[in-house]
Image: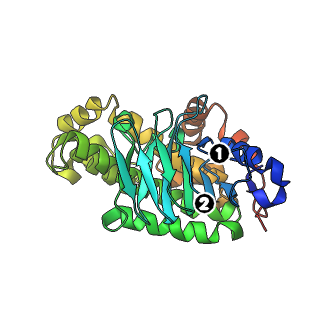
Amino acid sequence: MRAWSFSTESHPRAQRAEAWREAMNRLGLPIEGLSNGEPAAASVVCLTSPLGLEFALVEAGAQTISGRLTGQPAAVWLAVLLHGEATLVTDELAVSVASNDIAFGPTGQAAALRLDTRSRLLFVRAPRVALDHRLIRPFNLRVGWLDGSKGVPRILSGLLRATAEELENLSVDQLRPVDLAFTEFLAQCLLEQGAAVSDSLDASTPTAHLQRLCQTIETLLPDPELSLRRVANEEGVSPRYVQKLFASANETFSHYLRSRRLERCRIDLASPQHARLSISEICFRWGFNGSAHFSRAFREQYGQSPREFRQGREPSGAETLN
């Protein structure tokens, strides 16, 4: 089930606390500090996007929501405070989160979001598979927060607030453009946060150079003649330096380029908007020179052929929460 909702109001009073715990556990967000008595009214609206991103609109009274649950797949969680007061707590910090600020962290690291008043939040859980191709150095991530009042985080916060306001009216397929925009903005924010930790956001550092190289590659993906030298020339550096930057992240230029093209093809294959395009047309539009080579590379990357992947997609355009 890609879309679901929950409200304590639909359960007998004596069962509401346990039902709420179960609903939050389903989101991978175990709660603390909730008595066995009747909790304040609480609700969840959840929608899972085509890329596997989970958007959950949560409204609840004062309690502590943990960001760690054993057995979760590797992912990045994110929470934007829409209304209320909250505090992000880890072993190293306790910081007040203002409205529109964004708390984030990798699953598996101990963290908690303490709701100090009745609050409304949008939680997003993004599988690492949906972000790895954009996060060259994902293991630098740790729990933190983004100031939602300026820069790229402000744009991301605005996107998430608008998504939260319309979540109950959206279908899974209507989340596709949100998927793409969200992953790009989140990757940019996390890359900047990682650079702040390791390189102090100096534009001349290797991390910043690698980030710019990846952005350049992204804009040139459709060009079948795209080469290491072309990218180096675009950035005004030597091909050897480009190779060195990718090697510093345990990556290669050719592997990264292929992975990005495959991911773009996978998105198009899953999209109803591109259903009339043949598999060959899709692979050519993202820079592959031959459909046979593309099919082999796709199977190697995703464990099934492009045709099998396309045929196995669930028809979900009519699924909403209304």
Relative to 135, 46 lies left or right: right
Residue nearest the viewer, comparing 15 with 124: 15
Relative to 150, 126 lies left or right: right
Residue nearest the viewer, comparing 239 with 62: 62
Residue 37 placement (x, y as % from top left): 73, 49
Residue 155 placement (x, y as % from top left): 40, 67
Residue 45 image-quadrant placement: bottom right
Please tell me which residue is depicted at 53% across the width and 51% down the height of the picture. Answer: 284
Amino acid at dot 1: Leu
**Disc 1 target residue:** 27
Relative to 55, 93 lies left or right: left
Please determine whether, in this image, residue 265 is positioned above or below residue 246: below
Numbered disc in front, either 2 or 1? 1
Please determine whether, in this image, residue 105 is positioned above or below residue 159: above
Amino acid at dot 2: Arg
Quarter that holds the C terminus:
bottom right
Residue nearest the viewer, comparing 128 with 295: 128
Identify the disc placed on residue 149. none
Please tell me which residue is depicted at 41% across the width and 61% down the height of the picture. Answer: 101
Residue 110 placement (x, y as % from top left): 46, 34
Of helix, strand and loop, which one carries label 2? helix
Q: How is the image coloured?
A: rainbow
Residue 182 visible to the viewer: yes
**Disc 2 target residue:** 176
Of helix, strand and loop, which one carries label 1? loop
